[in-house]
Image: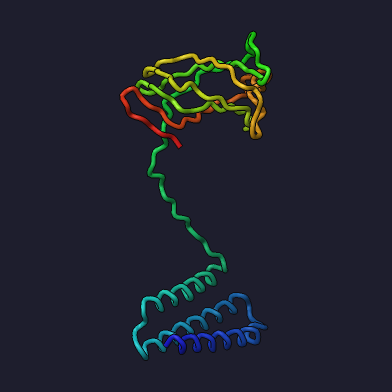
């Protein structure tokens, strides 16, 4: 059965290909398209007739015919343009709200000390717990970028935060100012206008006083 269908399709398509040039010499584009549509419809009817002689069309054959003729005719009658609608899948996972916020920051050269192996920068952060739960331990970083999106540097946040709900703490630390992996380095904070610096929190995990924890991707 499949072999007879293939042979019939091949014969009709060959006849169509041979007939269109001689028929189309003095025809408009619309007339040419009408002729092709008629031939495709005849092909569909011929295949259906061959199938009905032996047995009803199987779902696989019906799908093949629908894909072949439905798509072809839709494309021809719409002027060759086909539109596709992308299925939009709503995000079922709500965006996580960070429990911390950086209210302000400052950078300066540290006073005294020996930092032969480092280009030291002293950075002060004002951090607020904006959640309604007390935070015990924190694993995260503060990333500095300029307004063009260039990486300046990254500093680790204090791990043993012990910060109550809606409370604020000031953290000061001395960090290596040299950059790594394409960063210009935290030492740039000593020169750049602070108005052109953005600070983003990169939290990995937060452990609350009540023993619950939240991980962030």
Residue 185 percent location from the top left of the image: 65, 26
Quarter of the image that includes the N terminus: bottom left
Residue 103 percent location from the top left of the image: 50, 18
Residue 99 horizontal side relative to residue 149, left or right: left
Residue at figure coordinates x 43%, y 29% from the top left: 98
* Front one among 31 and 47: 47
Tell me if I can see residue 146 in this picture.
no
Q: Is residue 78 above or below residue 104?
A: below
Residue 57 percent location from the top left of the image: 37, 82
Residue 21, picture quadrant: bottom right
Residue at figure coordinates x 44%, y 76% from the top left: 64
Q: Is residue 92 above or below residue 154?
A: below
Which residue is most to the top?
112
Q: Is residue 175 above or below residue 73?
A: above
Which residue is most to the left?
210
Residue at figure coordinates x 41%, y 22% from the top left: 130
Residue at figure coordinates x 36%, y 25% from the top left: 208
Which residue is most to the bottom?
53
Residue 71 horizontal side relative to residue 212, left or right: right
Coloring basis for residues: rainbow
* Front one among 190 and 36: 190
The mark total stands at 0
Tell me if I can see residue 181 in this picture.
yes
């Amino acid at each position: 059965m499949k072999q007879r269908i293939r042979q019939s399709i091949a014969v009709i398509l060959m006849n169509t290909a041979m007939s269109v040039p001689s028929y189309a010499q003095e025809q408009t584009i619309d007339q040419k398209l009408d002729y092709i549509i008629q031939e495709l419809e005849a092909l569909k009817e011929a295949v259906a007739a061959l199938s009905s002689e032996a047995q009803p069309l199987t779902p696989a054959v019906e799908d093949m015919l629908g894909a072949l003729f439905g798509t072809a005719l839709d494309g021809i009658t719409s002027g060759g343009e086909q539109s596709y609608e992308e299925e939009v899948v709503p995000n079922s996972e709500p965006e996580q709200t960070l429990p911390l916020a950086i209210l302000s920051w400052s950078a300066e050269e540290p006073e005294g000390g020996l930092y032969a192996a480092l280009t030291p920068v002293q950075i002060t952060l004002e951090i607020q717990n904006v959640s309604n739960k007390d935070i015990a331990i924190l694993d995260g970083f503060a990333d500095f970028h300029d307004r063009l999106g260039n990486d300046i540097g990254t500093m680790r946040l204090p791990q043993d935060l012990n910060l109550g709900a809606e409370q604020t703490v000031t953290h000061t630390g001395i960090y290596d100012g040299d950059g790594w992996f394409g960063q210009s380095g935290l030492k740039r904070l000593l020169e750049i206008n602070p108005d052109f610096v953005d600070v983003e929190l990169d939290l990995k995990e937060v452990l609350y006083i009540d023993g619950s924890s939240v991980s962030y991707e």
